[in-house]
Amino acid sequence: MRIGKSTGARLRTGRALTDFLLLFAMVGVTLQIFPSQAIEPSREKSTVFDWRENTQNGHWYRLTEPDLNWLEAESQAQSKGGHLVTINDATEQEWIYNHFADSKRIWIGLTDVGQEGHWDWLTNDGGIWDATAMSGTSFTNWGVGEPNNNADEDYALMVWPDWNGVIGGWTDGKDSVGNRSYGLIEASQPTPWYDNYDFASKGVVAYWPLDGTAEDVTGNGNDGIVVGATPTNGMFGGSYHFDGTSYIDLNENYSGLNEITYSLWFKADVLSAYPEPEGHHGRVPFRHRGDFADHNPSIWSNRLSVSIYDLDGNPYADTTLPISTHAWHHLAYGYGDGTLLAFLDGEKVIDEPRTGSIDWSNYMWTRIGYHSSNYEFLNWIGEVDEVVVFNRVISPYEARLLAS
């Protein structure tokens, strides 16, 4: 596939930011059928925001939004710096089949809309295939009897697990309102998943990818200043490492929400066992600091506590469970609808009733990797990545997606 010039956007891979942030062919001289032992689908799920690198050809792939017709899918592919996928050979076909099985079917970049029966790839480098002569220069994986041009079908789909007896077989479909699906984008270098994303409609009020900067990419002005923290490789793209004295000072402007969820990835270099180092305080990777209105987790090797104070004076809730060092964990914790919730690695671990509304009084600061100068032994030592703030409580399903 020949792709246009890179946009220069930062690389974003492995994205799993919920289905509100998150979701979730063809031609040749002979039909291509893979042996069954070669096509067991990957257990790793693909979401709308995943970019995946095919190391065999160096290209990147991701799904479009769901429920698009072919023209809409191609338009979205171009907005992400690529086109609908061109499948050049059996190796690429097999890689796509194994990595995007959850999509069930996808639009690919093959069409005969220009001349009936003359199937061309969008990128003009995948060859052509003549449906009338049943021959051509392109790789093919049509299902048996396809393409059949039933009701003037001009656009190609790849289908899981098979189509008309062919594993990952292709079929022709109409670009109509009732024929909607994912598309599969192929690009030489992916654009960030959040480019032109409508954060407001999904309830995202702040998002710091921490890919070498402390920018809030929602455009809501919650940008931060890095104080001593060092960039490093993260769970997705980059992250920052904190040494117990360093932190990121955030310009937080979302105070006053009636509901909230904080989401972040963390990897600890050091964790103490409860009740060390300081009673109900463990290491703190993120803190919204108020006089008596703290919003922060405390993490031990054997315990998790989350704090979002309400106006009735209810502070933190905690649970006993193992948390390993030198490994990435996902944490989401929130308050709303009379409940304080926490999810660790996608599983609900705290669910406690609350009666009062969130206490936002006497705000001081919000920082990543920091508890306080008076209690430096509670400051974070390790990495933090992908910090997100929602203006609502997320569902258990969304928590699992965030942690995937």
Image (spheres, rainbow, N blue to C red):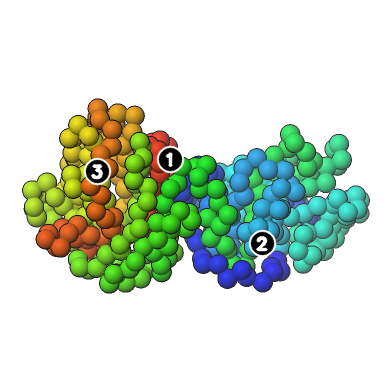
Q: CA distance from mark 3 to mark 2?
A: 48 Å
- Tell me the element at label 3: loop
Residue 378 % position (x, y): 15, 58
Which quadrant of the figure has residue 393?
top left
Q: Earlier in the sequence, mark 3 or mark 1?
A: 3
Q: Earlier in the sequence, mark 2 or mark 1?
A: 2
Q: How many marks?
A: 3
Residue 330 % position (x, y): 33, 50
Q: Is residue 251 above or below residue 55?
A: above
Disc 2 marks which residue?
A: 82
Q: Earlier in the sequence, mark 3 or mark 2?
A: 2
Disc 3 marks which residue?
A: 361
Residue 181 % position (x, y): 67, 42
The residue sitting at 46% across, 50% down in the picture is 16
- Tell me the element at label 2: loop
Specify whether 118 is left or right of 31: right
- Viewer-proximal residue, 312 or 11? 312
The mark lying in front, picked from 3 and 2, is 3
The residue under label 3 is which amino acid type? Ser
Specify whether 293 is left or right of 6: left
